[in-house]
């Protein structure tokens, strides 16, 4: 019943503490962790609090990308310079919980929990995020899509933790849309991120809450390419129906107490179409 | 007008002004002591083991491992219940602790008292119950004929109302089947309390509840103790809405305290709270309405099934309300209504704000709109045509003798200006922070609904409240057992006493069982009942005062507007002044006019008084995604007389928000008898962003005969017709039928 709490002051120290005993569990903002402890779904005997570690709390703009420390909170992501650099991440952060939750909850915790409904996940996936992992053995990089391997499952090794996340800075339109039954503070029924990549004239589409692990709607991304005009930022509407279908088909949703699979499949397609047409105005092919 | 614009909180007290609640600031700053803040020297923590199965036989309970944990002081099971192992609000049919059978998921089986809540929780996890899992009965309709799951059978009540001519028919008929999901009171402060044992074997229970004396009666039966050995004192209540009318942890706490000889405290966590109190009855309702070409109702046929869950609680009274008011606030000469309150292995259901009227009102108002559309009559006009008037009969044959300003309520609301068109703000649209909806996806709809609610207990229940007014040299103390659940009774006590006695030094003595019952804080009844008792007690003081002075001075005085005026009119003394240096103690019991049981045709003067309300909802709907944003709810309500304007508005705003919750958000989702969302992550209450401006078009003040100051109860009506108004508005925007609440996104988008 006794729970030891160790307060780490550097990433190095986390490595050491995990090196001594890799059953120790990491506590960031605690917004998932403490709920599990309170409901006795988790009863750790030793906890490492990592939210005061300066390296993990910081982010920096590094050439074409931004590196976000795992303990950066939603509060920091949802406004200010980060919001300008990665707008879809900010849009998603603004939907998370309440102000209290956003003050405490972190991006690393969202990845660590690896919930299919985690709101950072579709954005990071659509951005092709790379996650830096660290342990006493050293560091490695892994794509977010490979890190999360199932419902609440990651491929984190023993004694390994998330140090930071790297996402590209694109300076082109991005959209995050989330469906919940309530206007705020609601877990996603479905969510979707659409990122534009003007250089490759392509879009990245990340799906939320409809698959056990991070999912890109690759076929839809591929298909819609031919219907987009990157100079006029227009989309040929004749491609939209099939685009929508392809996005829906990329989902493997379930029935649960939050919604039903049929609605999730339907709404994820609708979100994709809306995200796309917010960025690319509809141009009739005959005009 | 909004609450803050219209009613400024005044410093002056007395009836009719917005005097400030004494608990307002402490509650806002966090200093108010709720039942969860109770603590005592040497206190233990209690915890309950509950059944994970909706239906099972208990073969064996092995708690040896749990009892061996250091810091665990007691583990109690059914065999430790000292008295009758049964309790129940209307009649005892529910075990204090399950003996051989569990009938719902969440039913208490064993109790632990330990030094620390974590130790108690650990002990609970180490009690091993050997269950033989049975197939639960979860369908209310089949319960009527299914094998009984309880010795008393599955039909808790079957009620028929046979009124007028069953062969009558109209020019048009409209028919529909409607469903209401299981709403929860979801009060913010979970159940909590503390029992303190005395060396003489008696016990004091400090508890948040709605009705101290009903609790006491049930506890003494289970503990096998006389009344004076189980004393209850009200602890700070964090909301109730009906969910605290039944006994929850009360007997458990007393058992643990008496067993260990130490004070024992319990707090349910949110999950346990959802399992630990009754919910609103889910309902299935069929209606066929007959009307003439001109829109006048001819006959209403209805079948109503309420799922009472595993135990009776107040199912019988809820069903009576559902049936008695199953034709709404409308005049109709013929009605054939049949209702069942049944037992299933679902969680027990009982009292919740609106009490049976919520379920039928949703269906009635949908039917009224169908008639309007079948006859191409404006829905508001149709309602005006059929509105009950004073002197009319309801379908139980009871004549409305009091105020019934139904037409005024409807027309004042209809005349109220409509809200502005949508503003161009992504967050203000359906979907809110999710950024789902552009203006082009939005359709606006408007819906109108009207309701009737009976006030106070019914069907012959001996309903009373006792109040003591004690005057000591100009200062006044008032004692009742009336439970303050947040409705503002404590404020009202001040106002009434000040109004009658002119004194502002007034103490409200904590509610406890050392005075007679005040009845429940429910049924919109406490202003009338306990407010009435306080009024009478204060008036009795004045009568005695006049007598005393007459004896002393030989002059007869009369009470004129708070002052004593001598018979010859030459002398005037303010009552407050006359009270100085004197002492009085007046205790009175207040009763409302008697009511009577319903006969076999559902006829009888079963109710005391009626209150009416109308709601108009404006919604924006994103039909493709099925998302709804309620833009505004406007209301007019029949209130008799407003005693405290800001409190009246508070009841109306809160009630409407709860009605909106049932319309589009709030439901305990059941799967084979087990609640799937017993937490605030997934039981979705409206947030500030979901709650629209609430416009009060009119509060109709027609004093109600027999009510103190003419005031009607105002707590329940806001919840009743707000739900159908919102759903009607969604129908208006989408053209969909929508026969079930809450309306879920898939109900709109996949239609
Ligand atoms: C009321 C409420 C509302 C919520 N609403 C939302 C919502 O709308 N959308 C949403 O996505 N989530 C929501 N959540 C969930 C939660 O807030 C988020 O998942 C949050 O990002 C978790 O971050 P945290 O810092 O609190 O993590 P913690 O709770 O501290 O940790 C979560 C998990 O991640 C692990 N972990 C933390 N940091 C690391 C690391 N650096 N390396 C490896 N593992 C790590 C922990 O060990 C733990 O298993 C909500 C939670 C609550 C209580």
Image: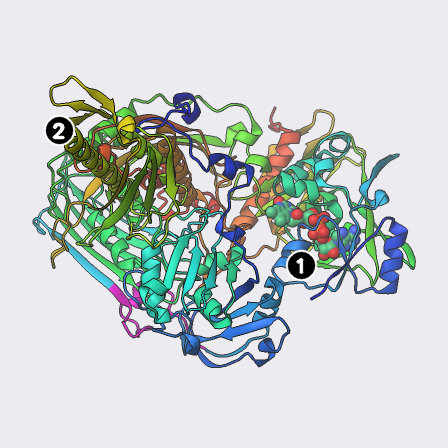
**Of residues B27 and B155, the one drawn nearer to the viewer in this rendering:** B27
**Of residues B317 and B618, the one drawn nearer to the viewer in this rendering:** B317
The answer to if B150 sits in the magenta stretch is: yes
Q: Position of residue A110 (x, y in %)?
A: 71, 49
Residue at the extreme top of the image, as rendered: B570
Q: Position of residue B94 (x, y in %)?
A: 35, 68
Q: Position of residue B82 (x, y in %)?
A: 39, 75
Identify the image quadrant of residue B724.
top left
> Where's the C terminus of chain B, which quadrant?
top left
* Callout 2: SS: loop
- Magenta region: B133-156
Identify the image quadrant of residue A226.
top right
- Residue at (43%, 76%) from the top-left corner? B80
The answer to if B652 sits in the magenta stretch is: no
Nearest to the eye among marks 2 and 1: give it: 2
Q: Which of the labelled discs sits on residue B554, or is there none? A: 2
Check if mark 2's residue and mark 1's residue have beta carbons within 8 Å. no
The lab-note entry on whether marks 2 and 1 share a chain reads no
Mark 2–mark 1 distance (CA, rounded to whole Å): 89 Å
Q: Report whether the residue tagged 2 is closer than 8 Å to ligand 1.
A: no
**Of residues B407 and B647, the one drawn nearer to the viewer in this rendering:** B647
Residue at the extreme bottom of the image, as rendered: B59
Q: Report whether the residue tagged 1 is closer than 8 Å to ligand 1.
A: no
- Chain designation of label 1: A
> Where's the N terminus of chain B, which quadrant?
top left
* Callout 1: SS: loop
Q: Which of the labelled discs sits on residue A151, or is there none? A: 1
- Residue at (9%, 52%) from the top-left corner? B166
- Chain designation of label 2: B
Does the image show residue A166? no
């Amino acid at each position: 019943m006794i729970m030891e709490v160790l307060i780490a002051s550097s990433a190095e120290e986390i490595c050491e503490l995990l090196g001594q005993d890799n059953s120790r569990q990491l506590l960031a903002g605690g917004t998932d962790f403490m709920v599990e402890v309170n409901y006795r779904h988790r009863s750790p005997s030793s906890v490492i609090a990592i939210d005061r570690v300066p390296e993990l709390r910081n982010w920096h703009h590094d050439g074409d990308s931004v590196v976000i420390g795992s303990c950066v909170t939603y509060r920091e992501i949802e406004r200010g310079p980060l919001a300008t650099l990665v707008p879809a991440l900010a849009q998603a952060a603004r939907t998370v919980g309440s102000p209290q939750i956003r003050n405490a909850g972190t991006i690393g915790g969202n990845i660590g929990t690896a919930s299919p409904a985690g709101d950072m996940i579709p954005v990071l996936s659509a951005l092709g995020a790379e996650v830096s992992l660290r342990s006493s053995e050293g560091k490695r990089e892994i794509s977010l899509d490979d890190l999360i391997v199932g419902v609440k499952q990651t491929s984190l090794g023993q004694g390994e933790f998330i140090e930071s996340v790297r996402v590209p800075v694109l300076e082109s339109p991005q959209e995050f849309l989330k469906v919940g039954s309530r206007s705020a503070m609601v877990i996603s029924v479905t969510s979707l991120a659409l990122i534009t990549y003007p250089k490759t004239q392509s879009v990245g589409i990340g799906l939320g809450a409809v698959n056990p692990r991070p999912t890109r709607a690759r076929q839809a991304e591929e298909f819609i390419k031919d219907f987009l005009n990157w100079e006029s930022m227009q989309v040929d509407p004749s491609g939209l129906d099939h685009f929508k279908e392809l996005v829906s088909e990329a989902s493997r949703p379930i029935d649960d107490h939050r919604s039903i699979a049929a609605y999730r499949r339907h709404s994820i397609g609708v979100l994709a179409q809306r995200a796309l047409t917010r960025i690319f105005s509809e141009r009739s092919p005959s005009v | 007008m909004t609450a803050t614009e219209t009613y400024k909180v005044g410093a002056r007290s007395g009836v009719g002004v917005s005097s400030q609640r004494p608990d307002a600031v402490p509650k806002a700053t966090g200093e108010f002591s709720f039942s969860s803040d109770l603590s005592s020297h040497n206190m233990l923590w209690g915890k309950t083991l509950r059944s994970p199965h909706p239906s099972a036989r208990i073969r064996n309970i092995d708690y040896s491992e749990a009892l061996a944990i250091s810091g665990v002081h007691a583990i109690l099971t059914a065999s430790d219940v000292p008295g009758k192992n049964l309790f129940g609000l209307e009649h005892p049919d529910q075990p204090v602790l399950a003996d051989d059978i569990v009938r719902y998921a969440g039913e208490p089986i064993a109790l632990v008292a330990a030094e620390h809540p974590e130790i108690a929780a650990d002990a609970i996890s180490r009690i091993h119950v050997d269950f033989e899992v049975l197939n639960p009965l979860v369908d209310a309709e089949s319960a009527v004929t299914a094998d009984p799951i309880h010795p008393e059978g599955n039909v808790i009540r079957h009620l028929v109302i046979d009124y007028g001519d069953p062969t009558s028919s109209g020019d048009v008929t409209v028919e529909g089947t409607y469903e209401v999901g299981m709403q929860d009171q979801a009060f913010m402060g979970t159940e909590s309390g503390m029992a303190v044992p005395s060396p003489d074997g008696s016990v004091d229970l400090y508890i948040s509840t709605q009705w101290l004396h009903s609790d006491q009666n049930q506890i003494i039966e289970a503990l096998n103790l006389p009344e004076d050995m189980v004393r209850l004192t009200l602890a700070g209540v964090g909301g109730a809405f009906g969910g605290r009318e039944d006994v929850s942890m009360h007997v458990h706490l007393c058992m643990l305290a008496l067993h260990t000889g130490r004070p024992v405290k319990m707090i349910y966590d949110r999950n346990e709270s959802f399992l630990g109190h009754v919910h609103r009855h889910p309902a299935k309702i069929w209606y066929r309405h007959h009307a003439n070409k001109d829109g006048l109702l001819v006959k209403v046929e209805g079948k109503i099934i309420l799922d009472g869950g595993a135990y009776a609680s107040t199912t019988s009274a809820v069903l009576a309300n559902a049936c008695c008011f199953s034709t709404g606030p409308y005049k109709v000469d013929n009605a054939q209504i049949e209702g069942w309150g049944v037992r299933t292995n679902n969680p027990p259901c009982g009292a919740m704000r609106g009490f049976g009227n919520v379920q039928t009102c949703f269906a009635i108002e949908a039917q009224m709109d169908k008639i309007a559309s079948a006859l191409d009559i404006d829905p508001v006009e149709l309602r005006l045509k059929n509105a009950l008037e004073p002197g009319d009969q309801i379908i139980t044959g009871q004549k409305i003798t009091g105020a019934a300003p139904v037409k005024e309520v409807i027309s004042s609301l209809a005349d109220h200006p409509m809200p502005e068109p949508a503003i161009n703000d992504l967050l203000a649209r359906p979907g809110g922070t999710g950024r789902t909806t552009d203006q082009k996806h939005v359709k606006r709809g408007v819906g109108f609904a009207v309701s009737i609610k009976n006030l106070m207990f019914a069907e012959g229940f001996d309903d009373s409240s006792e109040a003591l007014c004690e005057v000591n040299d100009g200062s006044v103390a008032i004692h009742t057992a009336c439970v303050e659940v947040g409705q503002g009774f404590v404020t009202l006590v001040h106002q009434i006493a000040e109004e009658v006695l002119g004194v502002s030094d007034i103490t409200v003595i904590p509610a406890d069982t050392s005075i007679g019952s005040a009845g429940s804080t429910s049924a919109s009844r406490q202003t009338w009942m306990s407010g009435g008792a306080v009024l009478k007690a204060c008036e009795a003081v004045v009568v005695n005062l006049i007598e005393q002075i007459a004896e002393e001075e030989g002059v007869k005085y009369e009470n004129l507007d708070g002052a004593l005026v001598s018979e010859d009119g030459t002398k005037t003394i303010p009552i407050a002044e006359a009270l100085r240096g004197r002492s009085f103690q007046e205790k009175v019991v207040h009763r409302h006019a008697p009511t009577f049981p319903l006969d076999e045709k559902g006829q009888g003067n079963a109710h005391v008084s009626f209150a009416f309300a109308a709601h108009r909802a404006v919604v924006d709907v994103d039909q493709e995604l099925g998302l709804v944003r309620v833009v505004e709810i406007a209301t007019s309500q029949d209130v008799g007389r407003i005693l405290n304007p800001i409190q009246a508005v508070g009841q109306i705003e809160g009630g409407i928000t709860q009605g909106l919750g049932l319309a589009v958000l709030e439901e305990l989702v059941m799967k084979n008898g087990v609640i799937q969302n017993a937490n605030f992550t997934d039981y979705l209450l409206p947030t500030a962003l979901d709650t629209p401006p609430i416009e009060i078009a009119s509060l109709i003040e027609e004093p109600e005969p027999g009510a103190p100051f003419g005031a009607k109860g105002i707590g329940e009506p806001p919840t009743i017709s707000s739900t159908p108004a919102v759903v009607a508005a969604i129908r208006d925007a989408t053209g969909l039928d929508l026969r079930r609440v809450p309306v879920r996104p898939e109900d709109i988008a996949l239609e």
